[in-house]
Amino acid sequence: MRAILFGVSLLALSSPTFAATAPHKAFPKSAVSQKSPVPDMSAVFAMFDKLFPPQPDPDPARLALARTSAAAMWPNGAYGTMTTGMMSTIFDRVMQMKASDLPGGDMKKDAAAAGDPSIHTLATMKDPYFDQRTAAMRQVVEEEAGKVSAIIDPRIRDGLARTMARRFDEHQLADINGFFATPTGHALATQYLQLWIDPDMMRSIFKTMPEMMKLMPDMMAKMKAAAEKYPSPPKPKADTAKAKG
C-alpha cells in the first residue's frame, strides 16, 4: 500500500529544503542521526521487524503455485507503470484546473488579479520554460520509477506469493492459476492494480470523508470516556515540582 502525486512530487524534488526536513518528520528522533538528516535504517528496520515479524516459510508446493499467481498479478514494471500513470494523470488534471478551483492560497490571489486563468497558464506566465522543464522532469521521474520498479517488483511478488501460499490451499491456488490463464482471468490479473486508482474508485473513497468526519467527535468522546474509567497516571516528579512552585 506507501504511499502517493506527480505535481507534489515535482515540487518536493525541486525544493531545497525537502532533503533536510523530510527525514526528521518521517522517522522518530532515535532513528535519525543528530549529525545527518539521513535516518539510521538499522533502527528503522529493527522497529519494523517488531511491527511485522518474519513469518514461517509456507509449504513449498503451495508456494510454487502461489508464485505463478503472483507473477500474473504483479508483472515486471507494474509498480513503475502504476505510479507514473497515476501521477501523470493527476498532474495533467491539476494543470487544467483554474486557481479558483483550489481551496485557497497565494495562487488564488494571483488568479483573481489575472482573470482566473488555468493553473497551467499561470505557471507558464511565471516560467516561460515551464512545459519544457516539466517534460524534462517527467522523463527523469519515469526513468527513475523504472529503476525503483526493478527493485520493488520482485520483492512484492515474493511477499504476495508467500501470503497467498498461507491463505489458499493447493486446490484453490490451482483454480486461481487456471482462471488467470484464461483471457478474462489474465485481464483481471493485469488490471486489478489499476482498479484501485481508477477515478470512480478514488471518488468513492474521497466521498466517504464528510461522513467519517461526522463520526469523529462521537468516537473521540467515547475514547475519552473509556480512558477516564481508570485513574489518571501519576505525573512526573518534574511536573509535580512545577505545580507546587
Image (cartoon, rainbow, N blue to C red):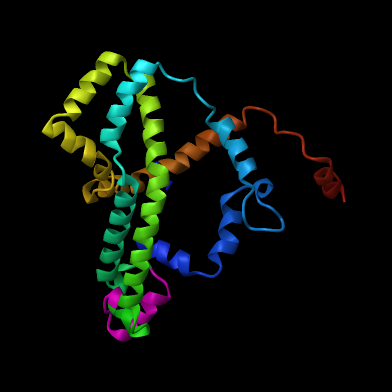
Dividing the picture into quarters, in which one does residue 192 lie?
top left
Would you say residue 59 sits in the magenta stretch?
no
Residue 3 locus on image (x, y percent): 42, 48
Q: Main secondary structure of the magenta part?
A: helix
Res. 123 image quadrant: bottom left
Tell me which residue sits at (22%, 39%) in the image. Answer: 190
Magenta residues (range):
104-120
| Position above or below: 70 against 142 | above
Figure quadrant of the N terminus: top left
**Outermost residue toward the left in this view:** 183
User: Which residue does the image show at 41% across and 31% down from the upper left?
Assistant: 159
Q: Position of residue 183 (x, y in %)?
A: 12, 34
Report if residue 123 is visible in the image: yes
Q: Residue at x 30, y 74 (%)?
A: 119
Residue 164, compared with residue 214, is above or below; it is above
Q: Nearer the viewer, residue 88 or 135?
A: 135
